[in-house]
Image (cartoon, rainbow, N blue to C red):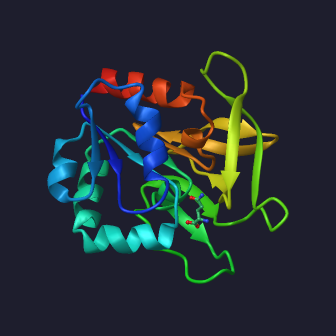
């Protein structure tokens, strides 16, 4: 199985570092072009700035190519900005223009919704099906999940809030598992993606 990390902008090195320790040599591909995308069996979409990543996806010719792979069931783990780009709906954040999204994952999000005081924070996240107790959730200017539609289902919570959802082979989190030093979620995703493959 070859695993891609969308490598246009954002915390790409952190995802690569986390994955390097879980995959065999040659199993990892920083993904920057449609030709790269064709080779991967699963994809990580990192955090960063969703408006920038959207622009770069378009420029690289990846917007259309990625949509086709997503619709065909490509397993994806998308964190923060990556998750934002998949959402069905973004409510106005009041902080500039919202980025275009693929609109495929049945959630409504609002970007940067934890306010100045909680712009970045850490908290214990409860993850369904993850052995070993609470997961260290790292939130950085995170979007808030306002609504989960019938096609998606929640699998992670911080306090009373949904912070992770799944829809088919797509997993989206508002926190950053790649920044926590805890590889359990990456491992769980890869084992499911491997089975689907
Ligand atoms: N605030 C960023 C955005 O709206 C997301 C932040 C992140 O990925 N950590 O795209």
- Left or right: residue 159 versus residue 6 is right
Depicted 170 relative to depicted 104: above or below? above
Q: Residue at x 25, y 63 (%)?
A: 62
Q: Is residue 47 left or right of residue 59?
A: right
Quick check: 117 above or below 166?
below
- The residue at the point 42 percent across, 26 percent down is 21
Above or below, 89 against 148 in this view is: below
Residue 175 rendering spot, x and y as whole percentages: 63, 47
Q: Is residue 153 visible?
A: no
Residue at image x 63%, y 16%?
Answer: 131
Q: Quadrant of ligand 1?
A: bottom right
Q: Depth check: give the residue in front, 74 or 120.
A: 120
Q: Nearer the viewer, residue 41 or 120?
A: 120
What residue is at 58 percent from the left and 50 percent from the top?
Answer: 149
Q: Is residue 183 left or right of residue 76?
A: right
Quarter of the rendering containing residue 194:
top left
Residue 162 visible within the image: yes
Find residue 53 and report its horizontal and vertical position in percent.
Answer: 42, 67
Task: Give whichever of 115, 154 is nearer the camera.
Answer: 115
Q: Position of residue 110 (x, y in %)?
A: 65, 65
Question: Residue 163: x, y in percent?
Answer: 66, 45
Q: Quadrant of the C terminus?
A: top left
- Quarter assignment of residue 162: top right
């Amino acid at each position: 199985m070859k695993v891609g990390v969308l490598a246009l902008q954002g915390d790409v090195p952190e995802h690569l570092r986390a994955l390097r320790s879980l995959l065999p040599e040659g199993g990892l591909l920083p993904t920057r072009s449609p030709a790269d995308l064709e080779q991967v069996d699963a994809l990580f979409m990192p955090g960063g700035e969703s408006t920038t990543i959207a622009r770069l996806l378009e420029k690289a010719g990846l917007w259309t190519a990625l949509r086709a792979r997503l619709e065909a069931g490509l397993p994806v783990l998308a964190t923060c900005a990556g998750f934002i780009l998949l959402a069905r709906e973004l409510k106005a954040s009041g902080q500039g223009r919202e980025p275009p999204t693929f609109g495929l994952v049945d959630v409504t999000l609002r970007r940067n919704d934890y306010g100045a005081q909680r712009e970045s924070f850490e908290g214990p996240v409860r993850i369904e099906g993850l052995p070993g107790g609470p997961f260290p959730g790292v939130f950085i200017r995170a979007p808030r999940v306002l609504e989960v539609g019938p096609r998606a289902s929640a699998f992670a919570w911080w306090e009373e809030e949904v912070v992770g959802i799944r829809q088919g082979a797509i997993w989206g989190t508002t926190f950053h598992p790649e920044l926590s030093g805890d590889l359990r979620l990456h491992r769980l995703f890869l084992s499911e993606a491997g089975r689907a493959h």
